[in-house]
Amino acid sequence: MKYLPLIRLLVNRELTLRYKRSVIGIGWTLLNPMLTSFVLWVVFSFAFGGRLVEGQQFAPYLMAGILLNTFFNQGTWLASESISTNSEILTKIYVPPQVFTISAAMSAFVNFLISLLPLAIVVLVSGQSLSLTLPLVAIVGICMTLLVAGFGLILSTLFVRFDDARNIVSVLLMIALYITPVFYPISILSKQMQTLVNLNPLTSYLEVFRWAFSNNASPTIANWCYMFLTSMLSISLGALIFRRAWPRTVAML
Amino acid sequence: MAVIELSNVNLAYRVLMNRTGSLKELFRDALKGRNRVVDYVALKDVSFTVDKGEVVAILGRNGAGKSTLLKILAGVLPPTNGFRKVTGFIAPMIELGAGFHPEMTGDENVLFYSALMGRNLETVKERTPAIGEWAGVSDHMSFPLRAFSSGMVARLAFSTATDEQADVLLVDEVLSVGDSDFQEKSNDRIQQLIKSGAAVVLVSHDMNAVRSLADRAIWLENGHVKMIGKASDVVDAYESN
């Protein structure tokens, strides 16, 4: 892996450049999810707060959902943009283009890891405790990184070729948010809606994540399997499609 | 020993006739059966080899396929069909400074640019002060690149790109970097790289430079090789054309 140092530099660059000209710099990575979660908590805690399982608080439940969704959104977006943003480089120096897409997915992962700190605080403040299964969060993170990198590999070639692919993807990402139990418990849905929400792979990731972090869910074996399966499928399909589409894509950069 | 080997390389761009830039239009046109795809052939049946220590110039008018050819040599564009083989470390001096970021410092940019070229970063870290000094920007290296003048950026890029011995040097009119002092200095450095055994492919419109630098020349016209041979012969033929 000759390009490992480059991946490290790219992840670093993504994390530091974003807030380079702001006063609190990387502090935004911590503050952003907290503010979003607070706003949504104010709005939804009355509606759904009492509907959770006994012993679970709404604040950590909600924030865990938001963090994982941010990871997915940001990762998909950065990875999909990675080829067009780096077209300058890709048309001049030979670098395996996948390096940029994978680095983008990885920087979303690092952002996610950083944002676990405020989540831990929220868990403790709301009177729950962190699970002993906490290290398993890393598995969810890695699976999500692979999922997002796969999506990115497929979408990045579309982003280069078609201007409106961005609009379509942003609508799809919003739909994904609503069919994932981010701010509502699954139990309030009708039977049909529950089936739909469970078919959404993100639901499995979220269930496992909430359970592993602070015991805010009870994932089944099926959830675990679905998570592994979709991440492997996404990355292998993405790599395959990207390899085939690349010669024509690079000609359009 | 041939460092660069191209045989029967073709490159075709696929162009959609109705200039479809959006999925919506693509879908609409597909429904109406209006999508016509035309292959625009940029390179046709190009074959040549370049040996170690040899300097080959590529001549041709705008749009003849010179830049496309350089990109294929750099490995950036995969040929549509045909065989391309380039052995060893390539230093692509095509529009230098790709990947330079205005918010990153000179040091960081040197490191990043070197990483893009696949260099060993440990050695680069040690070399960074020397790279900055050669470019004449030592006192600026810890400032963000936006504090550099454009000449300084170009010099730093050149200094970084040529810092390590390359096996293959691809040069696209970059000999005109900076002021006259620096031009002399950079010309010397290119000469030095050539002497130490790099194979060089250069694209230039400056026929005097081609005569003095190149051993052989390739004349491209509309994507195919019109003439290939000793530099002076090809330049004469090209100029009388």
Image (cartoon, coloured by chain):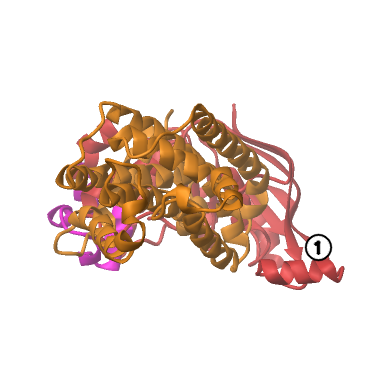
Query: Chain B is shown in which shade?
Result: red
The residue positioned 61% from the left and 57% from the top of the image is: A158
Give the side of residue B47 with respect to residue A191, left or right. Answer: right
Which amino acid, by three-letter code, is at mark 1?
Val
Using the rendered view, name the quadrant where residue B75 is placed: top right
Residue at disc 1, secondary structure: strand
The span shown in magenta is: B130-156
Residue ID for mark 1: B37
The residue positioned 20% from the left and 36% from the top of the image is: A129
Quadrant of the image containing the C terminus of chain B: bottom right
Tally the numbered discs.
1
Tell me if residue A248 can be seen. Answer: yes
Give the side of residue A246 with respect to residue A126, left or right. Answer: right
* Chain painted in orange in the figure: A
The residue positioned 66% from the left and 65% from the top of the image is: B63
Give the side of residue A139 with respect to residue B66, left or right. Answer: left
Q: Does the magenta stretch include residue A205?
A: no
Instruction: Judge by depth and name the residue closer to the eye, A116 or B220.
Output: A116
